[in-house]
Amino acid sequence: MKEDATIWISGTMHNIFSIGQILTELDFRILNVITWEKNNPPPNFSCRFFTHSTEQIIWARKNSKIPHYFNYELMKQLNDDKQMKDVWKLPAIAPWEKTFGKHPTQKPLSVLTRLILASTKPNAWILDPFTGSSTTGIAANLSNRKFLGIDKEEQFLEISKNRKLEIEKPSIAAKYKEKINGFHDKKELSLFLISEPKEEWVSELKL
Ligand SMILES: C[S@@+](CC[C@H](N)C(=O)[O-])C[C@H]1O[C@@H](n2cnc3c(N)ncnc32)[C@H](O)[C@@H]1O
């Protein structure tokens, strides 16, 4: 990770506390713990517990002294001009996100797109070392960021590759950008991406 990089780690109640503990031991600074509240969680069939309807995502910074990037203004815009809270109400994955088969724990593009736009600049490199069907990569590439994914299961890399090839078709990429949840209307994501300052890009071209 670069010195000014941040890390996002998603988990459930079973492991999120251990992850928080490990990050602290490694001197990371925890910035937020996002609660993703699913609009449409699966029911609890045992009827002996509350329905599990949330996942937690820790956002942490590698270096406690070097400032991190946060697109405060965009997050506020997406929350009707009020500060974005750390509880995100977004639906679980939709059928159009499973074109090439579903990964058993596939994340929705809406969650990944929001966290990428909040914490990275255009053309940034994003790494997901547990990439699965590469929702992170699809959200990154649709948002003009670069992506590297790693997974130990070939079958999931196959889904990832097919998803990547699919969004190389401009008409499909445009359609998906219209469908991603968390924006006021179909055009908001595309219009934001066009208007997003491209400083990183310019400095790379100078090299
Ligand atoms: C929770 S899933 C990721 C799902 C992904 N976010 C998506 O939307 O499709 C975690 C992935 O990590 C992979 N994995 C687990 N242990 C790994 C390891 N040691 N090295 C590489 N990949 C690993 C699993 O095969 C699995 O696909």
Image (tube, rainbow, N blue to C red):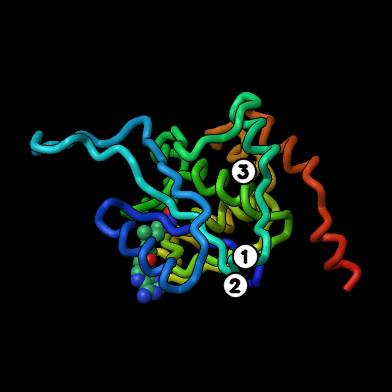
Residue 25's disc number: none
Element on which disc 1 rests: loop
> In the image, residue 94 lies at what x, y percent?
42, 37
> In the image, residue 135 lies at what x, y percent?
49, 53
Q: Is residue 204 left or right of residue 135?
A: right
Work out how far the residue at label 2 is from the one at label 1, CA to CA, in angstroms.
6 Å
Q: Earlier in the sequence, mark 1 or mark 3?
A: 1
Q: Is residue 88 above or below residue 198?
A: above
Location of ligand 1 given as a quarter of the image: bottom left
Q: Confirm if mark 3 falls within 8 A of ligand 1.
A: no
Tell me the mark number nearer the camera, choosing from 1 and 3.
1
Q: Residue at x 31, y 64 (%)?
A: 18
Q: Residue at x 14, y 38 (%)?
A: 49
Work out how far the residue at label 1 is from the one at label 3, CA to CA, in angstroms.
30 Å
Confirm whether residue 153 shows in the render: no
Disc 2 target residue:
1
Q: Nearer the viewer, residue 152 or 8?
A: 8
Inspect the image, locate mark 2, and give the three-letter code of the amino acid beneath it: Met
> In the image, residue 67 lies at what x, y percent?
67, 60
Asked if the residue at tag 1 contacts the one at tag 2, i.e. Cβ–Cβ closer than 8 Å, the answer is yes
Tell me the mark number nearer the camera, choosing from 3 and 2.
2
Disc 1 target residue:
5
Inspect the image, locate mark 1, and give the three-letter code of the amino acid beneath it: Ala
